[in-house]
Amino acid sequence: MTEPRTVDILLSQRFLPEPGGSIRWMYEVYSRWPQPVEVITHDYYNYPPNTPEFAQVPAPPNGRDHVTDDRLLMDRRDIFINDWGLESPHRLRRVLRMTAAVRERLRRCARSGQTLRVHCTHAVPEVVSLLPLKWLYGKRLQIISYAHGEEVTACCASRQLKFLMRRANAAVDLMIANSRYTTTVLDGHIDPSKVSVVNPGVRLDEFEPANELGRHWRQANGFGDRVIVLTLGRMDPRKNHAAVIEAVAQLADRFPNLLYVAAGQGREQSRLKARADQLGIADRIVFPGSVDGPTKLALFGACDVFAMPAIRDGTDVEGFGMVFLEAGACGKPCVAGCEGGQAEAVIDGHNGSVIDGTDRRAVTSAIERLLRNPAERDRMGRAGLAKAAEHDWPKVVQRTVELVEKLEEGQAVTP
């Protein structure tokens, strides 16, 4: 059997079983890649279980890796860096571990005359670890990186990280941005001819049972006649659960059967619960915490409106919003914020409403319009399902593969 001309590896310091949108994106793409992919990622299983960064990471099933896909070959090493700068020895050691892992593979490829393609979740720190190898191996090493938006703005807030990001971007052969918005924050930090947009996707077949699961969830919890607004996401200020809680307080008298389900965990959780108590609407809000896959489907299926009017929190901003596509896959209308790339996932007046999440009156009005108009909810829900179908993961993978193949053939990348 002839060996392939190229070998693909994914270098991602964060990966499954840790939750997160960028992690899901990498998994969905590279588990469908045309050839097997070696994944170099963090060794979650030999880390202290009470480490705050990994509080949501489950124990391994029967000592096995959570990732069981035959096409993903896992290589777990101690490479997690919470803060990306290189000023401390332990961070530098972890960066050098990434370098060493890729160097091992480069040597094998060099002996067999193959090219190594390294796909990186972020430019910093993953691509940074490849800089000495790019200098040594040149075209034998091709680097594909992803840009999500918030990490670019975070790097720009630090002189050291901004320098590292620009050096990494100069070494990248192809940068895949998750939205047109993200290309604007990359402007001035990378050669624009290297950048192309591929929106993340959604797995349509995964959400087919959602509405039936939602009906069961309503019945099991006694919520059969409630009108339900859902937010599902990490409880950070950017996700803006707080604005939806304020809207529920304003709408409680007008909609006696209104229920808000605020799913997720994070640093805002205790503050949000305290605010619900202060507003006297604790009985109108359910905080299920972090949810597993079946419960997530049930919540999407049970809700009438999905609301996450995300805002800018310092350098933190929503680069796209995969969760809006997931709501659309269940036929649910969305309320999104206007910051970042949300307006590319939710088209105002089409599959939902896009408003200024810092304007509490606008958030309340957008939710109220949908609650009062079932026909509008149905229309937008159908539009959301059609938009989700445009972003089915196989289509996302096809677009990504085409860009990478153009890179291999030496063709220009089309922005």
Image (cartoon, grey):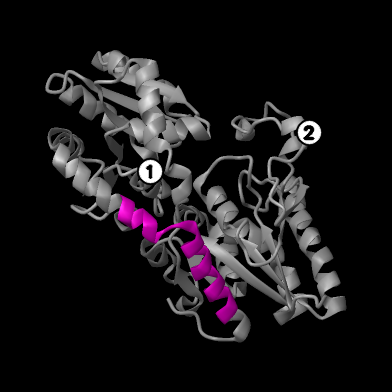
Could you tell me which secondary element the residue under label 1 belongs to? Answer: loop
User: Foreground mark, 1 or 2?
Assistant: 2
Q: Which amino acid is tagged 1?
A: Asp
Q: Dominant secondary structure of the magenta stretch?
A: helix
Position of 271 relative to 6 (above/below) = above
Position of the N terminus, as image quadrant, is bottom right
> How many numbered discs sit on the rendered protein?
2
| Front residue of this view, candidates 146 and 200 | 200
Q: Is 1 part of what is drawn in magenta?
A: no
* Spot occupied by residue 39 in the image (x, y as percentages of width and height): 71, 55
Tell me the residue that label 1 is attached to: 313
Question: For the residues marked 1 and 2, what is the alpha-carbon distance in whole angstroms?
Answer: 39 Å
* Spot occupied by residue 192 in the image (x, y as percentages of width and height): 45, 76
* Residue visible at 47% across and 54% down in the picture: 157
| Front residue of this view, candidates 385 and 118 | 385
Identify the magenta region: 385-406
Q: Is residue 229 visible?
A: yes
**Residue farthest along the right direction in this orientation:** 111
Position of 56 relative to 145 (above/below) = above
Q: Which amino acid is tagged 2?
A: Gly
Position of 21 relative to 194 (above/below) = above
Could you tell me which secondary element the residue under label 2 belongs to? Answer: helix
Tell me the residue that label 2 is attached to: 63
Q: Is residue 47 left or right of residue 285?
A: right
* Residue visible at 45% across and 60% down in the picture: 178
Q: Is 399 part of what is drawn in magenta?
A: yes
Position of the C terminus, as image quadrant, is bottom left
